[in-house]
Image (cartoon, rainbow, N blue to C red):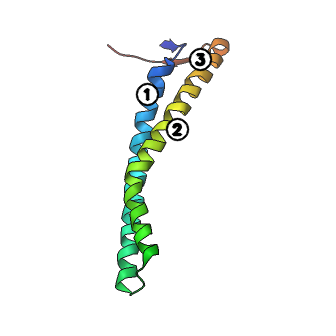
Amino acid sequence: MVKVEKLGVLSFAKVYAFLMGLLGLVIGLMISFVTLIIGSVSNFNGTSGLGMGLLTGFGLLSIIILPILYAAFGFVTGALSALLYNFVARFTGGFEVELKK
């Protein structure tokens, strides 16, 4: 067993930002899909207008904006988490990981 006594703050923040960016992309794709369906159904019912165009535009824009926002917040959260872990690990000794060669 190997004890993890300290995490690299920047490296942990980068990895967490990347993972959160992927999550933001998945959520953005789902929002885009739902808004495109709502927009097409509303056009089929004859209730099209500026509101439905904005809804569809928001859905497409969410594919770009959400991954960026999620990655930015993920970077900050990852850095704070690593700092907090490093602080707590001083008192508790960190957690144990079993590694194989």
- Which structural element holds mark 1? helix
Can you tell which of label 2 and label 3 is closer to the viewer?
Answer: 2
**Residue 88 image position (x, y, % from top left):** 65, 19
Within 10 angstroms of label 2, few (less than 14), some, or many (20 or more) residues?
some
Please tell me whether mark 3 or mark 1 is closer to you in this view: 1
Q: Which mark is residue 73?
A: 2
Between marks 2 and 3, how big is the CA–CA gap?
Answer: 20 Å
* Vertical order, 21 against 91 (above or below): below
- Out of 76 and 96, give the one closest to the viewer: 76
Farthest-out residue, front: 50
Residue denoted by label 1: 14
Residue 91 placement, left or right of 70: right
Mark number, residue 31: none
Residue type, numbered disc 3: Asn
Work out which residue is located at the far left of the displayed protein and give it: 101
Q: Amino acid at mark 2?
A: Phe
- Label 3: which residue? 86
